[in-house]
Image (tube, rainbow, N blue to C red):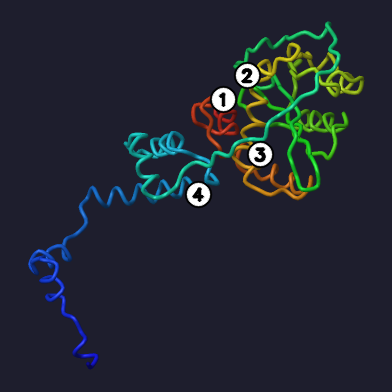
Amino acid sequence: MTAKERKISVNSVLNLLGVSSSGYYSWVKRKPSHQGMRKEKIKAEIVDIYNASHHIYGAPKITSILHSRGHVIAEKTVGNYMREEGIKAIWIRPYMRTTVAPDFDNKLKNILDRDFSPAAPNTVWVTDITYIYTLSGFAYLTSVMDLFSRKIIGWQVSHNLATEHVLKAVEKAKSNRNLSKPVIIHSDRGCQYVSKSYLEATPAKQFIRSYSNKGNPWDNACIESFHALIKREWLNRYVIKDSEHVHQLVFEYIETFYNTVRIHEHCGMMAPYDFEHALSS
């Protein structure tokens, strides 16, 4: 049989499938509906927002961004479109955290008392240390957050739990902010935060030191939540080689995304930087 003889006509296939030729050609010439074109345009925008968030945003945040751009769309519709595109927010189970309780000093007071919504920047800072697993052993991240905007104003990655690394994070926070009056600085009762060098680095003229109650992580929930967030959204997706690798990843997340781009419900679906800028303008 020659190639010419093996050629199958469209009409032959249509007859085989029981489809009329007029119906087929009408379908071929049919232009996409306005609704269909809008759907495809929205889906493309959803994918762009999703990719820009490093695959972190789910339907609620993407819907909020679409609303800010003038689109009228329901969160359920955004979720449906995301499923059609085969995308969803990355949610990686964090590593289990363990703590060792030291002999706490009864004189340490909880000044913050879970008031997590101060009225202005540089009113309350919170700080904590978390561990990060690497192929070379544990690395540690110390972070300092301004509770007003949830902005990370100082951070330090280290390969051990020495107090000097906490001090470096605090010094970075001090250099990034202009303190005109004493600020509450809240932490847990870890040995780093009750050490002589920490007390010297947070003098009474600049700071009012506050401490969580014994064995109660909820007293420092916001910074605990941030450390869970950076692991869940970012660090836990990588096989991390060492503390230097941790530093690179933390820098990318905090400085190029979390502080400047990532929207927060607490900030009215704005990034911390924009939230503070809106207050000052």
| Residue 232 x/y as whole percent | 61, 37
Q: Residues within 10 Å of mark 2 (few under 14, many from 20)?
A: few
In the depicted structure, whether residue 231 falls above or below residue 14: above
Q: Secondary structure at mark 2?
A: loop
Q: Residues within 10 Å of mark 4 (few under 14, many from 20)?
A: few
Seen at 43% across and 37% down, the residue is: 59
Q: How far apart in space, not on screen, are marks 3 and 1 (Cα)?
A: 21 Å
Foreground disc of the pair 1, 2: 2
In the depicted structure, whether residue 127 falls above or below residue 118: below
Residue that carries the numbered disc 3 in the rendered image: 254
Asked which quadrant contains residue 149, the reply is top right
Q: Earlier in the sequence, mark 1 or mark 4?
A: 4
Residue that carries the numbered disc 4 in the rendered image: 51
Foreground disc of the pair 2, 4: 4
What amino acid is at disc 3? Ile
Residue that carries the numbered disc 2 in the rendered image: 120
Q: Mark 2 touching mark 4, by CB under 8 A?
A: no
The C terminus appears in which quarter of the rendering? top right
Q: How far apart in space, not on screen, are marks 2 and 3 (Cα)?
A: 21 Å
Mark number, residue 279: 1
Q: How far apart in space, not on screen, are marks 2 and 4 (Cα)?
A: 33 Å
Q: Secondary structure at mark 1?
A: helix
Q: Secondary structure at mark 3?
A: helix
Q: Mark 1 touching mark 2, by CB under 8 A?
A: yes
Q: Earlier in the sequence, mark 3 or mark 1?
A: 3
Foreground disc of the pair 1, 4: 4
